Amino acid sequence: MICFRTSQHLNAYIAQAHGFGRLIGFVPTMGALHQGHLSLLGQAQQQGGLTVCSIFVNPTQFNDPADFEKYPVHLEQDIYLLAKHGLDILFLPSVAQLYPEGLSHLEHYELGYLEQILEGSSRPGHFQGVCQVMHRLLSLVQPDHLFMGQKDFQQCLVVRQLIDQAYPRVALHTCPTLREPDGLAMSSRNARLDASDRKQAAAIYQALQQLQQRLQPGGLSAILEQAKDFLESQGFRVDYVQIADAATLRLVDRWDGKEKLVALVAAFLDGIRLIDNLLLNP
Ligand code: AMP
């Protein structure tokens, strides 16, 4: 595994790889790696090209400074895991490398509806930060294939929009969510849960499964209310529980029995914000 800390060296290496006709598969992360991240690397490796992974805790996508401060950093363990799993190239940029112009007055992306709902409305500026960092990473890594997790469902749609506009050559692969045995979606933030919250946290997946089981054509507000009540009874402060069109993320309150749907949850346990989603009728 080769590790680059500067854009110039990474860029030169990538240009050479492209010159040799090698395809590049890219997995961007914020580190504190778990099996979910490694499954994205596994999918990238199946493509057979050069695999590139980045670890960068992107300050511009944290709308809550305390969340940024507390974001877990396990760099040595991450490097060990990636080397053990056969990654080719690790990119470890600094903030100054990716944002040489500083962090204020950054470019603005027109994301329309996607920025007004769910994660967009709950975390103002979050998707601007996602686009700012992804734009920089994609222009440096120039991947043929990009691997991202369905766990961050709305992020995948936002990045698809960025790719369609600026990087039409890149194939985006949305990879399934890896879960703990009790159903909790793997997440770097799970490490911050204490033992009792960790037990409660599985209720998010249970709420999503209940929505799937209760789904019937017609109005959806009653089952959404039940899911919210269930999560509150399990100690959560619910940010949102919604059902949306799986392709556009338009919120759906009445189902015609055909439209492909996704249920999405964001909820806090002792101040730690967890998100998850489930395709209801894939
Ligand atoms: P993060 O480090 O949280 O920014 O995540 C990096 C990538 O890993 C993103 O594309 C996430 O959607 C993806 N990811 C995070 N958790 C999981 C999971 N449990 N299963 C699969 N992919 C995941």
Image (spheres, grey):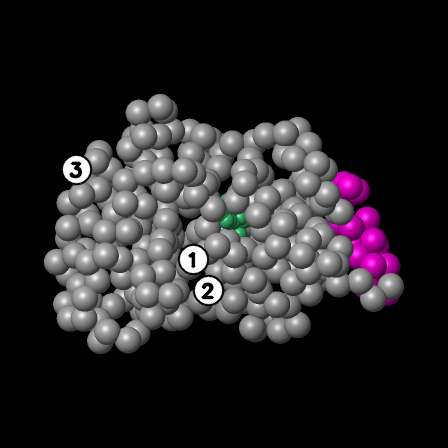
Q: Is residue 217 above or below residue 106?
A: below
Around disc 3, counting alpha carbons within 10 Å, would you say few (fewer than 14), some (14 to 19), or many (20 or more)?
A: few
Q: Which residues are magenta?
A: 1-19
Q: Is residue 231 magenta?
A: no
Name the residue at 33% across, 70% down: 260
Q: Between 189 and 150, which is closer to the camera in this rendering?
A: 150
Separation of marks 2 and 3 at Cα, in angstroms: 32 Å
Residue 151 at x, y percent in the picture: 44, 51
Question: Is the shortest distance between ligand 1 and the CB of mark 3 under 8 Å?
Answer: no
CA gap, disc 1 and disc 3: 26 Å
Residue 15 magenta-highlighted: yes
Q: Main secondary structure of the magenta part?
A: helix
Q: Quadrant of the C terminus?
A: bottom left
Name the spot of residue 179 as percent of width and height, x first.
43, 43
CB within 8 Å, label 1 to label 3: no
Q: Which mark is residue 226?
A: none
Q: Name the amino acid type tagged 1.
A: Phe
Residue wearing tag 1:
153
Tag shown at residue 233: 3
In the picture of the structure, the residue carrying the numbered disc 2 is 157
Q: Residue at x 28, y 51 (%)?
A: 209
